[in-house]
């Protein structure tokens, strides 16, 4: 009963005050590269919508690695957070367990007005709703980065920001432009393809590597690139597609006496796909 009530409240939050016109979507592979186990995953962030137009979540889904149980979306919503800003959150749960080296894949699509920005992304694993905490008392955040695509045409820039509390390596980022909106469920290996490979469902897309990578972003750090420098130009009605790989910058340690006790012994990583309308 509690979930039914919550879902009803969230749905009321998602109805727009007026129609909006721009798609922003993200898809992520998230690998569980820690000792122990989890059965939930939580992500939150900020999107922008201009002119006081309330954005909507038009599609959301999650799938899991075979053997991790049945994953479902249990909570999601949008909360006003200042002029043109909305915080979003989504929570995914399984009736099983996820353990070392298994993964989930989730996607969220938003409809916004005139702003193709998704930023301040933070994601972490939980067990029965409780965030996994490391020995430093921090949430075990996973490597997710936000993207800000601003400007018009050849002057457009791409800003990539690390809003987590861990160093994140953007190992690879490829860009292309499509003349059609890619369905959320196709922004995945089976649709847009792995990095460095042709797109299975969209073979005519020509992908361009972003120069200057790999690059380590410390918490709060960002980098910007002129899209024209990556071979990308856009006109109204087109969609910028991104795909790449990001991971944590090695293990973290806690000094104990004269030795070091490692908290993380692996580097969590995952592929991502993202779409921004123009």
Image (spheres, rainbow, N blue to C red):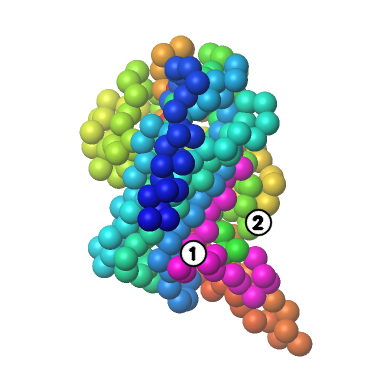
Q: Is residue 224 visible?
A: no
Residue 53 lies in what quarter of the image?
A: top right
Residue 108: in magenta span:
no
Is 125 placed above or below 244 here?
below
Residue 165 disc label: 2
- Earlier-in-chain disc, 2 versus 1: 1
Q: Secondary structure at mark 2?
A: loop
Quarter the N terminus occupies: bottom left
Residue at the image point whose x is 45% and y is 17% from the top: 19
Which residue in the structure is indicated by mark 1? 129
Real-space Cα separation, disc 2 to disc 1, in angstroms:
20 Å
Residue 124 on image: x %, y %: 52, 58
Q: Is residue 126 magenta?
A: yes
Task: Say above or below: 204 vs 105.
Answer: above
Indicate the position of residue 58 as horizontal and vertical percent values. Answer: 38, 32
Residue drawn at point x = 56 percent, y = 72 percent? 264
Quadrant hosting residue 188: top left
Mark 1 nearby-residue class (10 Å; few <14, some 14–19, many ≥20): some
Q: Which residue appears at 26% of the width and 30% of the height?
A: 202
Tell me where residue 173 appears, x and y as whole percent: 48, 40
Q: Position of residue 147 (x, y in %)?
A: 55, 35
Badge 2 density bin: few <14, some 14–19, many ≥20, Cα 10 Å? some
User: In the displayed image of the protein, which residue is found farthest to the left?
Assistant: 201
Front position in the image: 170 or 73: 73
Image-based side of 150 in relation to 272, left or right:
right
Depth check, mark 2 against mark 1: the one in front is: 1
Q: Is residue 12 above or below residue 152?
A: below
Please report the bounds of the magenta region as a residue range. Answer: 119-138
Visible in this render: residue 206? yes
Q: Which mark is residue 259?
A: none
- 127 and 13: which is toward the camera: 13
Q: Tell me the quarter of the picture where residue 265 sits.
A: bottom right
């Amino acid at each position: 009963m509690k979930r039914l009530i919550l879902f009803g409240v969230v749905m009321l939050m998602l109805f727009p005050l007026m129609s909006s016109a721009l798609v922003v979507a993200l898809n992520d592979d998230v690998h569980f590269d820690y000792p122990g186990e989890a059965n939930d995953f939580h992500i939150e962030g900020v999107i922008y919508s201009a002119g006081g137009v309330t954005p909507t979540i038009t599609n959301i889904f999650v799938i899991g690695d075979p053997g991790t149980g049945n994953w479902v979306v249990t909570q999601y919503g949008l909360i006003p957070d200042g002029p043109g800003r909305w915080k979003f959150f989504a929570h995914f749960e399984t009736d099983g367990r996820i353990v070392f080296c298994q993964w989930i894949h989730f996607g969220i699509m938003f409809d916004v007005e005139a702003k193709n920005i998704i930023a301040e992304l933070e994601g972490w694993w939980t067990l029965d709703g409780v965030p996994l905490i490391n020995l430093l008392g921090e949430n075990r955040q996973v490597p997710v980065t936000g993207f800000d695509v601003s400007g018009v045409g050849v002057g457009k820039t791409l800003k990539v920001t690390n809003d987590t509390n861990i160093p994140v390596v953007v190992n690879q980022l490829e860009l292309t432009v499509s003349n059609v909106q890619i369905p959320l469920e196709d922004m995945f290996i089976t649709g847009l393809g792995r990095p460095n490979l042709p797109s299975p469902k969209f073979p005519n897309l020509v992908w361009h590597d972003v120069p200057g990578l790999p690059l380590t972003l410390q918490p709060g750090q960002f980098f910007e690139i002129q899209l024209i420098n990556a071979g990308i130009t856009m006109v109204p009605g087109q969609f910028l597609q991104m795909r790449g790989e990001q991971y944590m910058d090695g293990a973290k340690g806690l000094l104990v006496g004269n030795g070091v006790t490692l908290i993380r012994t692996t580097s969590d990583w995952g592929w991502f796909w993202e779409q921004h309308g123009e």
